[in-house]
Image: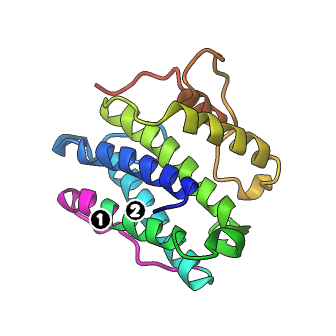
């Protein structure tokens, strides 16, 4: 049985995987809320990120996993699922949560690495939903938890190393997933794809 935080990650990875599977053939080159990324780029980023973190957790060394940029659209869903499974196996390894691992953001405790992947799955799942006109997926309680984590950790990220855009204004009565997306720089009021 997976530990509770890993179960949360599994749920978020599954939700995002369903969005990847829902991308239509004509949507791979559409823009996303991530500046300069099309849907294809966003999905490749998710796959590569999962691969990098899995290797970092298992090897405890800076990661240089193979990139997924050469994948054809018909390969993306399977590649995403494989990368998600590898990530879950790595996070399920004994002692990984308590040790320091080197990930693209630097050296962090394993539990922080898990939260970073949770935020990635939630926010990039939101991005993918916006870009493809699919309903956003994501557990609201989990999104609220990761919003609190993100707000607490943003002050620790040097501005020159921040992977996020400036926080955007958003009404407090919108979903926790929308508030999380706005916290990391997404304009939640922008028009959605159909």
Q: Find the residue positioned furthest to the front.
A: 1
Q: Mark 2: which secondary structure?
A: helix
User: With respect to residue 191, does 42 lie above or below?
Assistant: below
Residue 139 seen in the figure = yes
User: With respect to residue 120, does 133 lie above or below?
Assistant: above
Residue 184 seen in the figure = no
Task: Say if mark 2 contacts mark 1, CB within 8 Å.
Answer: no
Q: Quadrant of residue 172?
A: top right
Magenta stretch bounds: 63-80
Disc 2 to disc 1, C-alpha distance: 9 Å
182 relative position to 66: left or right = right
Give percent across and percent down for residue 192: 38, 25
75 relative position to 90: left or right = left
What residue does disc 2 label?
84
N-term mark: 2 or 1: 1
Q: Residues within 10 Å of mark 2 (few under 14, many from 20)?
A: many
Q: Nearer the viewer, residue 71 or 154?
A: 154
Q: How many marks?
A: 2
Q: Quadrant of residue 114?
A: bottom right
Give percent across and percent down for residue 124: 47, 45
Give percent across and percent down for residue 73: 22, 56
Give percent across and percent down for residue 70: 29, 69
Quadrant (top left, top right, bottom left, bottom right) of the C terminus? top left
Q: Residues within 10 Å of mark 1 (few under 14, many from 20)?
A: some
What residue does disc 1 label?
79
Question: Residue at 57% of width from left, 18% of height from top?
Answer: 174
């Amino acid at each position: 049985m997976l530990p509770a935080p890993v179960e949360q990650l599994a749920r978020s990875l599954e939700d995002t995987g369903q969005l990847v599977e829902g991308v239509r053939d004509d949507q791979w080159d559409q823009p996303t809320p991530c500046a300069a990324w099309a849907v294809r780029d966003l999905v490749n980023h998710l796959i590569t990120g999962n691969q990098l973190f899995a290797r970092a957790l298992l090897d405890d060394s800076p990661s240089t996993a193979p990139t997924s940029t050469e994948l054809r659209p018909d390969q993306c869903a399977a590649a995403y699922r494989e990368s998600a499974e590898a990530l879950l196996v790595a996070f399920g390894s004994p002692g990984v949560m308590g040790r320091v691992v080197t990930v693209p953001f630097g050296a962090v405790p394993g539990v922080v690495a898990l939260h970073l992947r949770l935020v990635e799955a939630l926010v990039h799942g939101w991005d993918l939903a916006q870009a493809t006109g699919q309903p956003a997926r994501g557990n609201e309680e989990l999104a609220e938890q990761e919003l609190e984590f993100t707000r607490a950790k943003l002050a620790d990220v040097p501005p020159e190393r921040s992977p996020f855009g400036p926080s955007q204004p958003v009404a407090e009565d919108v979903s926790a997933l929308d508030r999380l997306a706005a916290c990391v720089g997404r304009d939640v009021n922008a028009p959605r794809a159909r």
